[in-house]
Image (cartoon, rainbow, N blue to C red):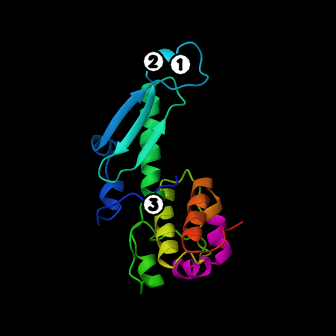
Amino acid sequence: MAHSPPSTNGLPRATWARLSEDQLLAQCEVDTYRASGPGGQKRNKTSSAVRLRHTPTGLIVIAEESRSQHENKAKALKRLFQALFLELRDTLPADVTPEAIAQLPDFASVLDGAGRLHMSVKNPRFWPVVGVVLDVLATVEAKVSDAAALLGISTGNLIDFLQIEPKVWQEANRLRTHFGHKPLR
């Protein structure tokens, strides 16, 4: 998305990220519409596509790949949860230390026995960790080596982690461009 970042109104991301799906959905404007494209005879006859607009933050997500409105709503909620971590930044103090980062609830004890950040997208902690990593990257003006030092990992490990999910890589490069650095390759 090429728009200005959504607003958190000064509230931490956890304000929304810790909500249940029902609580999060209750904060959304839900639009259903007919999606265009392939999908068989039923596709254009039902309003199965779902757009969620999270009112407090302005985040907007859509899901329209299923012919089931119920499935699309579930996918849109999952995307909204991911967007909370991809697009909302928690401001860290300029003098934040590696010890303080290691104590953040979403980052505490995620490093493996070898001190590396290694986890799958399927891990339920993945997106919260992405949020912390991107917050740190934003705090150090997208300097990867500085971010890695604050996270207590190697630069190579940080780059490997950012590459696990294309949307994370894209957001890291958007931050780098924002701060006047070349995109990572």
Residue 106 in the image: state x and y as whole percent.
Answer: 42, 65
Alpha-carbon neighbours of circle 2 within 10 Å: few (<14), some, or many (≥20)? some
- Identify which amino acid the numbered label 2 is placed on: Thr
Residue type pointed to by label 3: Pro
Magenta region includes residue 147 = yes
According to the picture, the residue beneath numbered tag 2 turns out to be 46
Would you call the spot at circle 3 few (<14 residues within 10 Å), some (14-19), or many (20 or more)?
many
**Element assignment for label 2:** loop
Label 1 sits on residue: 43
Report which residue position mark 3 lands on: 128
Categorize mark 1 by other alpha carbons within 10 Å: few (<14), some (14-19), many (20+): many
| Gap between marks 1 and 2 measured at Cα | 6 Å
Relative to 81, 184 lies left or right = right
In the rendered image, the vertical position of residue 174 relative to residue 103, given as above or below: above
Q: Is residue 33 left or right of residue 110?
A: left
Identify the element where label 3 is drawn: helix
Element under label 1? helix
Residue 112 visible? The answer is no
Give amino acid for label 1: Arg
| Sequence-first disc among 1 and 3 | 1
Q: Which region shows up in magenta?
A: 144-161
Q: Are marks 1 and 2 in contact (CB under 8 Å)?
A: yes
The location of residue 67, given as percent across then percent down, is 51, 23
Q: Which residue shows up at 32% across the image and 54% down it?
A: 16
Q: What type of secondary structure mainly makes up the magenta span? A: helix
**Magenta-drawn stretch contains 85:** no
The image quarter containing residue 91 is bottom left
In three-dimensional space, the C-alpha distance between marks 1 and 3, rounded to whole angstroms, equals 35 Å
Residue 119, quarter of the rendered image: bottom right
- Residue at 60% across / 58% down in the picture? 170
